[in-house]
Image (cartoon, rainbow, N blue to C red):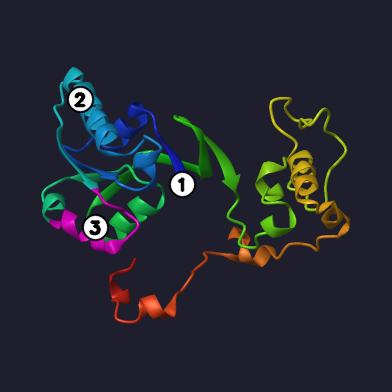
Amino acid sequence: MIIAEQKPVAEIAGYIESCNKVLLVGCGGCVTVCLTGGEKETEILASALRIKRRQEGKPLETVTCVATRQCEPEYIDALDSAVRDVDAIISLACGIGPQYLAGRYKDKYVVSAMNTRFAGGAKRHGFWEEYCGLCGDCVLNLTGGICPVIRCAKSILNGPCGGSQNGKCEINRDVDCAWQLIHDRLKILGRLDTLKEIVPPKDWSRSRDGGPRKMVIEDVMSGSNPEKAN
C-alpha cells in the first residue's frame, strides 16, 4: 500500500493562514491503514488547526469528512455540498487525492496535508517498510520474491556487490543485504542455479522515467464515463 505521513501542523497552517473556513478530507484507503489520514487523524488535525488559530486570535472554522477513497472520482462526488462554502480543501490522502480534488473543484484552493513516502508493507503495528519501487518491470520471479530494485541499496540486478558482511548491507548494519536474502531464499527453493543467469538491463521506460504511466482494463472501462476521471 501507499505509505504517507502528515506534514507538520505549522506547515499546513501556513498554507491556509488567509482562510476562514476549510474542509478537511480524510481518505479511507491506504492512509487510514497506516494511521495518518483516516477519520481519527482528520479530526485531530482539524482540532490542532483550530487551536492554533484561536491562539493567534484568528478563529478558523473547519468541516471534516472522509472519502472512501480519494483516488476514485465516484467517491469525490459526495463532497460537492461540503466544498461549496469553504475557502480551501485540505486533503489527507496520498499525492493522488489532492490532485483529484484540484481537478474536480477548479475554483478551490487545495492543500496537501501529507508527504507521500513509498509503497510498503506492515512489519508490525505502526511499522511499515518499503518493499516495491513501482518500477513497472518486476523481477521478483527471478529473485525468490525479494525485490533487489528497492531492497538492495544499490538496486543491483546481478548481485551481490561484495560489500556486505554477515548478511548486512555496508550502508547500515541494521539493513539486511537483499542479495543475501535472495541467496538464502533460492537455496531453500533449490534454485540457486538461477543466480548464474545474467539478468539483462531493466526496461526503465516502464518506470517513472518514462513519464506518467497508465493501465487500462478494457472490459472494466466499457460502460464507464472516462470524462469523470481527472
Looking at the rendered structure, the secondary structure element under dot 2 is helix
Looking at the rendered structure, the secondary structure element under dot 1 is strand
Q: Which residue is mark 3?
A: 76
Name the residue located 26 percent from the left edge and 49 percent from the top edge: 109
Of discs 1 and 2, which sits in the foreground? 1
Name the residue located 20 percent from the left edge and 60 percent from the top edge: 77
Callout 1, which amino acid?
Ile
Q: Which mark is residue 52?
A: none
Residue 138: image location, x then y, percent: 65, 60
Q: Which mark is residue 53?
A: 2
Is any atom of residue 106 visible in this view? no
Sequence-first disc among 1 and 2: 1
Horizontal relation, residue 119 to residue 139: left or right: left
As measured in the structure, the alpha-carbon distance from the residue carrying label 1 to the one carrying label 2 is 31 Å
Magenta extent: 67-80
Of discs 2 and 3, which sits in the foreground? 3
Q: Are marks 1 and 2 in contact (CB under 8 Å)?
A: no
Horizontal relation, residue 211 to residue 170: left or right: left
Q: Which residue is mark 1?
A: 2
Of discs 1 and 3, which sits in the foreground? 1
As measured in the structure, the alpha-carbon distance from the residue carrying label 2 to the one carrying label 3 is 28 Å
As measured in the structure, the alpha-carbon distance from the residue carrying label 1 to the one carrying label 3 is 19 Å
- Of 176 and 23, which appears nearest the observer? 176
